Amino acid sequence: MSVLLALGTVSCVDLGENVYSSLLSANYYTQKSDVIKAVFRPFEHYFESVQRHVPMQEYPSDVFMTPQMDSYGWWDGGKWSDWHTHNWQDISGDLVRSHIADVWTNTYQGIGQCNLVLDDIKRLDHDRFPDITEDEWNSFESQLRTMRAYGYLVVFNYFRNCQLITSSSTEENEKVERKKQVAPEVMYNFIETELLECLDLLPVKLGSAGPGVQQGMFTKAAAATLLVRLYLNTEAWMGYDAYDKCEAMCTRILNGEFGDYSLSPTWYGPFDWDNENCNEVIFGFPASFGTTSWHMQNDYRTIYGRGLPFNCMDYLDIKEGGSRNPKWHLSPSYDNNNPRRLFSGAPYNYKLGCPTQKFLKYPGDLRYMQYKNTGNNTREGMFFLEGYIIDSKGNRAKSASNYDIYLLDQCGGFTTGAPTSTITDAARKESTLFNGDMNSGLYCVKYPFYPYSGGAFIESDYTVMRLAEIYYSKAECLYRNGDVNGAGALLNEVRARNYSNFNSNIAYRGSHGGSVELTDQEFLDEWMREFIFEGRRRDDLIRWDRFEEAWWDKPADEDKHNRIYPLSKTILEQNSYLVQNPGYPGLN
């Protein structure tokens, strides 16, 4: 049975502990397929969780905004502005209570599922399953341990002071030491040890044509990539660096020790409808229109499904999916003081944000083109750029207020004045999150939205890890250790595919005859260009010590306590042994 089938046969519902414990009793496991379904149930849980994880990384960053559009939504008590401006001090407010706390709870639910199945596997009589080899039993166990480590890496990153629970036993988990948080050093060492041990037990990727049927499984390279993430961020998280460890692990991956991986010849290969066959993908959650596709749906559980302009369905030929409720707009590059068109005005001078300017820096960027479906499940471009959204019949997309939508790299009350960059609503002249309309902001389309008729609509698997991350991570280690040219050469290996004419004026020094100097700012900008909308921007800003800076509609932070999130009032009330993170109010 493929992992895709295993995932597809188990619905993703919020199972309570008693129901799930009853389901996965000894009576449940009667054949091999039962074991497989149980093992990969937590994987589906974490796939559904991407709609929680990506906002934790992208909303508090400089790249995206969620403005209030006319009078049609995304006000919600100002919580989207609070996220954008790092204002999550109110531990009983909606932002902390319903979003940040949900990540803590949801991640621990997944950890609990892993613990439960691990304990079940230990209790099972393996002789009852003669068609499961000992290597497969080891693989099942290491898959679950790695997924559990993945979950702990999530909560450790966001909250730092976390509970460490490795058993499904109620009696064990009621002990005081299990209710308390462990020191960050303890959690760090646990994650590292688990991943290093599983590295020896997990399977190696098969072949050289992408993950294939192994998509959705942890392989050696996937566990190694989690170690790369741990080591790369060690200095930011722990106060001491592990760049040598990170570089060494990257080298092992790039040398093929954990399987044959290679960069896709195109920037879009890791995200396309058939990306299970892309040899750049290291780990992804299997998805399809007929099973689950959490990241691309058109409802509240999605990410990319709400990263499209309003009423773009006819342009994309996805009318059956309904109109869109756009949430993920690119942060604007231009103010509203002077009428401008097609980037003729002066952009903001913020060093962070203004993502379009970072893409425009180098000519011929194949990503920075208008997104267009080009037939036979192919695409070009990664953005909805400035202008009207016009379908194949020449009709313009209209707003909910019936004005023609003309997308601008600005934010304000333009309504019918957008084509000339003219504010028509004087009350919404200032460029803020509260003054947007349906013209405000451009859009990044990371995953393709192909027509229903082509058979590949929302078919892309969700790519969690890809080989380009290993190139960039090793390059950063080299850069921090003083080998700037070596870092530039590694980055160029990936960047060469992104430009129609990758020449010396685009390449960094170190290869391709590059003349571009690689600086701290340029490196951070390049992380954004390559990994925009992949749920990592917060980490990169923190690691480069830039998270507290001002950017569009965000003042500079007063201190650095926002680098970790608070525990909500409800979570603290439910467990009196938990201690609030520094800089945030407790229950009193």
Image (spheres, rainbow, N blue to C red):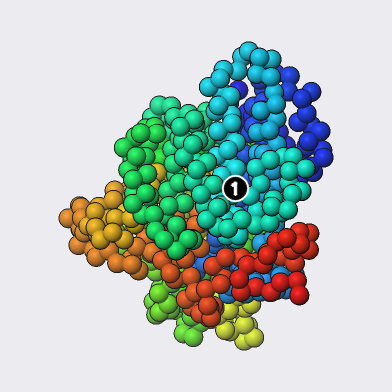
Query: Which residue lies most toward the left here?
Result: 513
Q: Residues within 10 Å of mark 1 (few under 14, many from 20)?
A: many
The quadrant in which residue 292 appears is: top right
Disc 1 marks which amino acid? Answer: Gly
Tell whether 539 sits left or right of 39. left
Tell whether 34 sits left or right of 225. right
Q: From the top left corner, tell me how far across and down residue 581 is, in percent.
A: 63, 67
Tell whether 581 sits left or right of 203. right
Q: How many marks?
A: 1
Above-or-below relation of 207 to 532: above
Which residue is located at x 58 percent, y 75 percent? 85
Q: From the top left corner, tell me how far across and down residue 265 is, in percent.
A: 34, 42
Which residue is located at x 49 percent, y 86 percent? 337
Res 421 visible: no
Above-or-below relation of 40 to 537: above
Query: In the rendered view of the protein, which quadrant contains the N terminus?
Result: top right
The quadrant in which residue 270 appears is: top left
Query: In the rendered view of the protein, which quadrant contains the C terminus?
Result: bottom right
Q: From the top left corner, tell me how far across and down residue 102 is, in percent.
A: 70, 57
Res 259 visible: yes
Judge by depth and name the residue closer to the eye, 27 or 362. Answer: 27
Which residue is located at x 56 percent, y 44 percent? 149
| Residue where numbered disc 1 is placed | 151
Which residue is located at x 46 percent, y 35 percent? 199
Above-or-below relation of 575 to 47: below
Q: From the top left corner, tell me how far across and down residue 264 is, in percent.
A: 37, 41
Judge by depth and name the residue closer to the eye, 18 or 184. Answer: 184
**Is label 1 in a helix, a strand or a loop?**
helix
Tell whether 539 sits left or right of 357. right
